[in-house]
Amino acid sequence: MTGTDRASRPGGRTARVRADVLAAVEAELAEHGYDGLTIDAVAARSGVHRTTVYRRWKTVAGLLVDLLQAGADDAWEPADTGSLEGDLIAVNREVHAALTARPSVTQAVIAASFRTPEAAEALTQFWVDRYERTAVVVRRAVERGEIPAGTDAHQLLLTATGPLYHQLVLLRRPMSRSIADQHARVAAKSLCGA
Amino acid sequence: MTGTDRASRPGGRTARVRADVLAAVEAELAEHGYDGLTIDAVAARSGVHRTTVYRRWKTVAGLLVDLLQAGADDAWEPADTGSLEGDLIAVNREVHAALTARPSVTQAVIAASFRTPEAAEALTQFWVDRYERTAVVVRRAVERGEIPAGTDAHQLLLTATGPLYHQLVLLRRPMSRSIADQHARVAAKSLCGA
């Protein structure tokens, strides 16, 4: 969900316009939040003509939805460290970094999801896709014999990541990276005695 | 955070007015969300004169903050079932019920916390108080010798409750009560091997 170098962008002018506009949406959202996000500011920041932005994205919600859809189109996959614990720690460090960045695009998108149903739906779809991709860390652990076949991947990932989102987004309290690591370890060991 | 019978309310007329107004805030919030919450609707529903509501609470945000402060003033404490697992299951069932109620006052208050900084601050304070009260389940488990002294109560409670909030509030996906129970069990066992 971060900008890429212009020269490396595939797809010609239309793809470049989209990339420029979405990079501007990210920057405006992170700096000013959803309330400060306007099509005019996005147009000015991206250098794309405002009538083009209005024609293609129509509304601020349309820009947000496209930002999340672009995020779902990327090639992200979780790190493969060789152990369930290592993989979950890597996942939690990504979540922790995204939620504690100043400014945090992720926090801004979450806040926006409580303002407009289209953004809420797009964020749910983005996360469904991300959690499905992350489930590979559980399948690899099953293949290595670390955890039983039939382990519920989503439930395990919620044990690892849920405490970070709850603390840093809803409770609005701090959490150190080492505590985020510990929540990953708890999840990795959550099948002991099972 | 739910209304009580008028006859049983202590404190005379001022306390009755507050209870009537806050019960109306809860009902309006649950039915219409933060966007539909107005001082006029709260006044009409509570039967309290609108000038009284404006004078005492001033804004919609003021009503929300007072609702959360009233919630913090109650006598709530977690169930004492005799085991850490039982206590955490009871906590998770309360959280699950609050987040899956239709309509859910808790979900409406969380959404409102992304609309106004005063509500965000009041919600954080409400939860800090609730999590501090809930920490007694961890202290009792230490006293029974179930878990080591020095166990971080908040971290343990985040392991139990964080997955429910993340799934039901941020991911906006369903979770059955039996999965909520399982997250409580994972937290209760999270110190095995420690």
Image (tube, coloured by chain):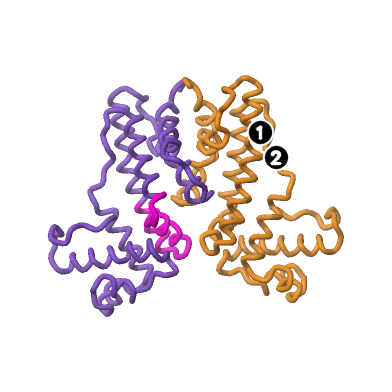
Chain colours: A purple, B orange
Q: Look at the magenta stretch and give its main secondary structure.
A: helix
Q: Is residue A123 magenta?
A: yes
Range of the magenta residues?
A99-126
| Disc 2 packing (10 Å; few <14; some 14–19; many ≥20) | few
Q: Amino acid at mark 2?
A: Glu
Q: Nearer the viewer, mark 2 or mark 1?
A: 1
Asked if residue B44 shows in the view, the reply is no
The chain containing the residue under callout 2 comes to B
Residue B77 disc label = 2
User: Tag 1 or tag 2, which sits nearer the N-term?
Assistant: 2
Left or right of residue A179: residue A46: left
Residue A113 occupies quadrant: bottom left
User: Image quadrant for the C terminus of chain A?
Assistant: top left
Residue B88 in picture, x, y percent from top left: 59, 33
User: Image quadrant for the N terminus of chain A?
Assistant: bottom left
Residue that mark 1 sits on? B136
Residue A6 vs A83, above or below: the answer is below
The local secondary structure at tag 1 comes to helix
Left or right of residue B108: residue A18: left
Q: Amino acid at mark 1?
A: Val
The chain containing the residue under callout 1 comes to B
Residue at horizontal 66 percent and vertical 27 percent from the top: B140
